[in-house]
Image: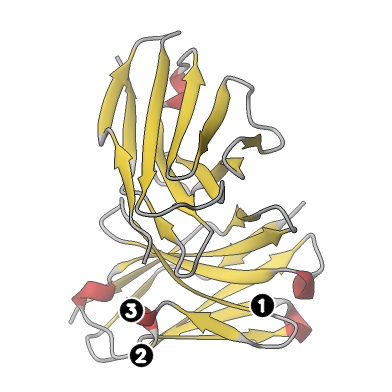
Amino acid sequence: DIQMTQSPASLSASLGETVSIECLASEGISNDLAWYQQKSGKSPQLLIYAASRLQDGVPSRFSGSGSGTRYSLKISGMQPEDEADYFCQQSYKYPYTFGAGTKLELK
Amino acid sequence: QVNLLQSGAALVKPGASVKLSCKASGYTFTDYYIHWVKQSHGKSLEWIGYINPNSGYTNYNEKFKSKATLTVDKSTNTAYMELSRLTSEDSATYYCTRLNSSPLYYVMDAWGQGASVTVSS
Protein backbone atom coordinates (compact mmCIF):
# COMPACT_ATOMS: atom_id res chain seq x y z
CA ASP A 1 0.00 0.00 0.00
CA ILE A 2 1.13 3.59 -0.63
CA GLN A 3 1.85 5.39 2.64
CA MET A 4 0.93 9.06 2.85
CA THR A 5 2.96 10.94 5.46
CA GLN A 6 1.29 14.26 6.25
CA SER A 7 2.86 17.11 8.23
CA PRO A 8 2.51 18.89 10.49
CA ALA A 9 -0.03 17.06 12.66
CA SER A 10 -1.28 20.39 13.93
CA LEU A 11 -0.61 24.07 13.50
CA SER A 12 -1.91 27.38 14.64
CA ALA A 13 -2.12 30.42 12.36
CA SER A 14 -3.04 34.05 12.79
CA LEU A 15 -5.68 35.78 10.73
CA GLY A 16 -4.26 36.51 7.27
CA GLU A 17 -1.24 34.29 7.72
CA THR A 18 -0.18 31.93 4.93
CA VAL A 19 0.04 28.28 5.92
CA SER A 20 1.31 25.16 4.20
CA ILE A 21 0.60 21.50 4.76
CA GLU A 22 2.66 18.77 3.15
CA CYS A 23 2.14 15.17 2.10
CA LEU A 24 4.87 12.75 1.19
CA ALA A 25 3.93 9.58 -0.67
CA SER A 26 5.95 6.39 -0.25
CA GLU A 27 6.16 6.13 -4.04
CA GLY A 28 5.39 8.35 -7.01
CA ILE A 29 1.67 9.02 -7.44
CA SER A 30 1.68 10.99 -10.68
CA ASN A 31 -0.31 13.96 -9.31
CA ASP A 32 -3.23 11.69 -8.31
CA LEU A 33 -3.58 13.62 -5.09
CA ALA A 34 -6.55 15.31 -3.47
CA TRP A 35 -6.93 17.55 -0.45
CA TYR A 36 -10.02 17.58 1.77
CA GLN A 37 -11.22 19.89 4.49
CA GLN A 38 -13.23 18.49 7.37
CA LYS A 39 -14.90 20.79 9.86
CA SER A 40 -15.93 19.53 13.25
CA GLY A 41 -18.82 17.08 13.05
CA LYS A 42 -19.04 17.31 9.26
CA SER A 43 -18.03 15.12 6.36
CA PRO A 44 -14.85 15.83 4.35
CA GLN A 45 -15.21 18.36 1.55
CA LEU A 46 -13.05 18.32 -1.57
CA LEU A 47 -10.72 21.31 -1.97
CA ILE A 48 -8.09 20.30 -4.51
CA TYR A 49 -7.80 17.38 -6.94
CA ALA A 50 -5.18 16.24 -9.42
CA ALA A 51 -2.67 17.92 -7.09
CA SER A 52 -3.45 21.47 -8.18
CA ARG A 53 -7.00 21.77 -9.56
CA LEU A 54 -9.33 23.84 -7.44
CA GLN A 55 -12.76 22.30 -6.89
CA ASP A 56 -15.68 24.48 -7.99
CA GLY A 57 -16.78 26.85 -5.26
CA VAL A 58 -13.58 26.63 -3.22
CA PRO A 59 -12.01 30.02 -2.40
CA SER A 60 -8.95 30.90 -4.46
CA ARG A 61 -6.82 31.33 -1.32
CA PHE A 62 -6.53 27.53 -1.39
CA SER A 63 -3.94 26.12 -3.77
CA GLY A 64 -2.16 22.83 -4.31
CA SER A 65 1.20 21.98 -5.82
CA GLY A 66 3.73 19.22 -6.07
CA SER A 67 4.80 16.29 -8.16
CA GLY A 68 6.24 12.82 -7.83
CA THR A 69 6.10 12.01 -4.14
CA ARG A 70 5.85 15.50 -2.58
CA TYR A 71 2.68 17.60 -2.48
CA SER A 72 1.51 20.59 -0.56
CA LEU A 73 -1.61 22.57 0.23
CA LYS A 74 -1.30 26.31 0.76
CA ILE A 75 -3.82 28.66 2.32
CA SER A 76 -2.92 32.22 1.40
CA GLY A 77 -4.44 34.31 4.16
CA MET A 78 -5.95 32.30 7.01
CA GLN A 79 -9.64 33.01 7.66
CA PRO A 80 -11.70 31.99 10.71
CA GLU A 81 -13.74 29.57 8.58
CA ASP A 82 -10.55 27.72 7.61
CA GLU A 83 -10.26 26.21 11.08
CA ALA A 84 -10.62 22.50 10.33
CA ASP A 85 -8.84 19.22 9.78
CA TYR A 86 -7.14 18.73 6.42
CA PHE A 87 -6.37 15.40 4.74
CA CYS A 88 -4.46 14.39 1.65
CA GLN A 89 -5.45 11.27 -0.30
CA GLN A 90 -3.87 9.39 -3.19
CA SER A 91 -5.93 7.84 -5.97
CA TYR A 92 -2.99 6.52 -7.98
CA LYS A 93 -3.26 2.95 -6.80
CA TYR A 94 -5.69 0.81 -4.84
CA PRO A 95 -6.16 0.73 -1.96
CA TYR A 96 -6.66 4.47 -1.83
CA THR A 97 -4.87 5.87 1.21
CA PHE A 98 -5.08 9.04 3.26
CA GLY A 99 -2.68 11.13 5.27
CA ALA A 100 -3.19 11.15 9.04
CA GLY A 101 -4.54 14.69 8.93
CA THR A 102 -3.52 18.19 10.01
CA LYS A 103 -5.50 20.13 12.59
CA LEU A 104 -5.46 23.84 11.73
CA GLU A 105 -6.49 26.31 14.38
CA LEU A 106 -6.80 30.07 14.44
CA LYS A 107 -4.33 31.68 16.79
CA GLN B 1 -27.38 19.18 -6.81
CA VAL B 2 -25.50 15.97 -5.99
CA ASN B 3 -26.59 14.52 -2.67
CA LEU B 4 -25.71 11.32 -0.84
CA LEU B 5 -28.08 10.69 2.06
CA GLN B 6 -26.93 8.08 4.53
CA SER B 7 -28.88 6.12 7.10
CA GLY B 8 -28.78 7.17 10.72
CA ALA B 9 -26.62 6.17 13.65
CA ALA B 10 -26.62 2.54 14.71
CA LEU B 11 -25.96 0.90 18.07
CA VAL B 12 -25.24 -2.79 17.62
CA LYS B 13 -24.10 -5.64 19.80
CA PRO B 14 -20.74 -7.35 19.37
CA GLY B 15 -20.92 -10.21 16.90
CA ALA B 16 -23.94 -8.77 15.11
CA SER B 17 -24.16 -7.23 11.63
CA VAL B 18 -25.34 -3.84 10.44
CA LYS B 19 -26.39 -2.65 6.98
CA LEU B 20 -25.81 1.01 6.12
CA SER B 21 -27.52 2.75 3.23
CA CYS B 22 -26.55 5.63 0.95
CA LYS B 23 -29.26 7.12 -1.28
CA ALA B 24 -27.98 9.13 -4.24
CA SER B 25 -29.78 11.98 -5.95
CA GLY B 26 -29.01 14.82 -8.33
CA TYR B 27 -27.07 12.74 -10.86
CA THR B 28 -27.29 9.51 -12.84
CA PHE B 29 -26.59 6.87 -10.21
CA THR B 30 -25.11 4.29 -12.58
CA ASP B 31 -22.55 6.71 -14.04
CA TYR B 32 -20.36 6.97 -10.92
CA TYR B 33 -18.77 4.39 -8.65
CA ILE B 34 -19.69 4.57 -4.96
CA HIS B 35 -16.82 4.29 -2.49
CA TRP B 36 -16.96 3.78 1.26
CA VAL B 37 -14.58 5.25 3.82
CA LYS B 38 -14.15 4.58 7.54
CA GLN B 39 -13.21 7.27 10.03
CA SER B 40 -12.16 6.11 13.46
CA HIS B 41 -11.62 8.24 16.55
CA GLY B 42 -12.70 11.34 14.65
CA LYS B 43 -9.44 11.51 12.73
CA SER B 44 -7.91 8.89 10.48
CA LEU B 45 -9.59 7.84 7.24
CA GLU B 46 -9.46 4.36 5.65
CA TRP B 47 -10.71 3.36 2.23
CA ILE B 48 -12.96 0.30 2.43
CA GLY B 49 -13.82 -0.37 -1.19
CA TYR B 50 -16.06 0.56 -4.08
CA ILE B 51 -18.94 -0.74 -6.14
CA ASN B 52 -19.84 -0.06 -9.75
CA PRO B 53 -23.61 0.60 -9.54
CA ASN B 54 -24.08 -0.35 -13.18
CA SER B 55 -22.48 -3.80 -13.10
CA GLY B 56 -22.33 -4.55 -9.38
CA TYR B 57 -18.57 -5.12 -9.63
CA THR B 58 -16.79 -4.57 -6.34
CA ASN B 59 -13.21 -3.96 -5.25
CA TYR B 60 -12.23 -4.13 -1.58
CA ASN B 61 -9.33 -3.09 0.54
CA GLU B 62 -7.79 -6.40 1.68
CA LYS B 63 -8.20 -5.23 5.27
CA PHE B 64 -12.00 -5.10 4.87
CA LYS B 65 -12.62 -8.06 2.56
CA SER B 66 -14.07 -10.26 5.29
CA LYS B 67 -15.76 -7.36 7.06
CA ALA B 68 -17.69 -5.38 4.45
CA THR B 69 -20.10 -6.34 1.67
CA LEU B 70 -21.13 -3.71 -0.86
CA THR B 71 -24.34 -3.89 -2.87
CA VAL B 72 -26.64 -1.55 -4.77
CA ASP B 73 -30.31 -1.29 -5.67
CA LYS B 74 -30.50 0.53 -8.99
CA SER B 75 -34.28 0.85 -8.73
CA THR B 76 -33.93 3.16 -5.73
CA ASN B 77 -30.48 4.68 -6.47
CA THR B 78 -29.23 3.30 -3.18
CA ALA B 79 -25.91 1.77 -2.22
CA TYR B 80 -25.50 -0.45 0.82
CA MET B 81 -22.63 -1.61 2.98
CA GLU B 82 -23.10 -4.50 5.37
CA LEU B 83 -20.57 -4.92 8.16
CA SER B 84 -20.44 -8.34 9.77
CA ARG B 85 -19.15 -9.89 13.00
CA LEU B 86 -18.86 -6.51 14.61
CA THR B 87 -16.31 -5.74 17.32
CA SER B 88 -15.36 -2.56 19.15
CA GLU B 89 -12.78 -1.92 16.40
CA ASP B 90 -15.67 -1.37 14.01
CA SER B 91 -17.05 1.53 16.04
CA ALA B 92 -16.53 4.47 13.69
CA THR B 93 -18.22 6.84 11.29
CA TYR B 94 -18.70 5.45 7.80
CA TYR B 95 -19.01 7.63 4.72
CA CYS B 96 -20.21 6.87 1.22
CA THR B 97 -18.66 8.96 -1.52
CA ARG B 98 -19.01 9.36 -5.26
CA LEU B 99 -15.97 8.88 -7.45
CA ASN B 100 -15.72 11.40 -10.26
CA SER B 101 -13.30 10.19 -12.89
CA SER B 102 -11.81 11.24 -16.18
CA PRO B 103 -8.69 10.27 -18.10
CA LEU B 104 -6.85 12.87 -15.99
CA TYR B 105 -8.12 12.31 -12.47
CA TYR B 106 -10.05 10.21 -10.02
CA VAL B 107 -11.56 12.09 -7.12
CA MET B 108 -14.20 11.59 -4.46
CA ASP B 109 -16.13 14.78 -5.09
CA ALA B 110 -19.27 14.24 -3.02
CA TRP B 111 -19.64 12.69 0.41
CA GLY B 112 -22.58 11.54 2.47
CA GLN B 113 -23.11 13.03 5.89
CA GLY B 114 -21.70 9.93 7.56
CA ALA B 115 -23.24 7.14 9.62
CA SER B 116 -22.02 6.49 13.13
CA VAL B 117 -21.77 2.86 14.19
CA THR B 118 -21.26 2.04 17.86
CA VAL B 119 -20.58 -1.54 18.86
CA SER B 120 -21.48 -2.16 22.48
CA SER B 121 -23.25 -4.73 24.57
In screen coordinates, is B63 left or right of A73? left
Residue at disc 2, secondary structure? loop
Colour theme: secondary structure
Q: Secondary structure at mark 3?
A: helix
Of the pair A46 and A53, the residue shown nearer to us: A53
Residue at image point 82% right, 68% down: B28
Pointer 1 or 2: first along the chain: 2
Asked if residue A18 is positioned above or below residue A5 in the image, the reply reads above
Name the foreground residue: A55 vs B77.
A55
Q: Which residue is identified by label 2?
A: B66
Q: Position of residue B97 (x, y in %)?
A: 58, 62
Mark 3 near mark 1, Cβ–Cβ under 8 Å? no
Element assignment for label 1:
strand
Q: In the figure, B94 relative to B49: above or below?
A: above
Residue type beneath disc 3? Lys
Q: Earlier in the sequence, mark 3 or mark 1?
A: 3
Q: Is residue B77 above or below residue A66?
A: below
How would you rate the neighbour count of disc 3 (Cα within 10 Å): few for under 14, some for 14-19, many for 20 or more? few
Q: From the image, tell me which residue sits under label 3.
A: B63
Q: Which quadrant of the figure has residue B79? A: bottom right
Left or right of A102: which side holds B94? Answer: right
Would you name the residue on which mark 1 appears?
A: B78
**Mark 2: amino acid:** Ser
Is label 1 on the same chain as label 2? Answer: yes
Whole-percent x, y for residue A57 in the image: 70, 33
Host chain of mark 2 = B
Residue at image point 46% right, 47% down: A42
- Figure quadrant of residue A95: bottom left
Residue A50, labelled with which disc? none
* Dot 3 and dot 1 within a common chain: yes
Where, by quadrant of the figure, is residue A103 drawn? top left
Q: Residue B50: horizontal and vertical position, in percent?
A: 56, 75
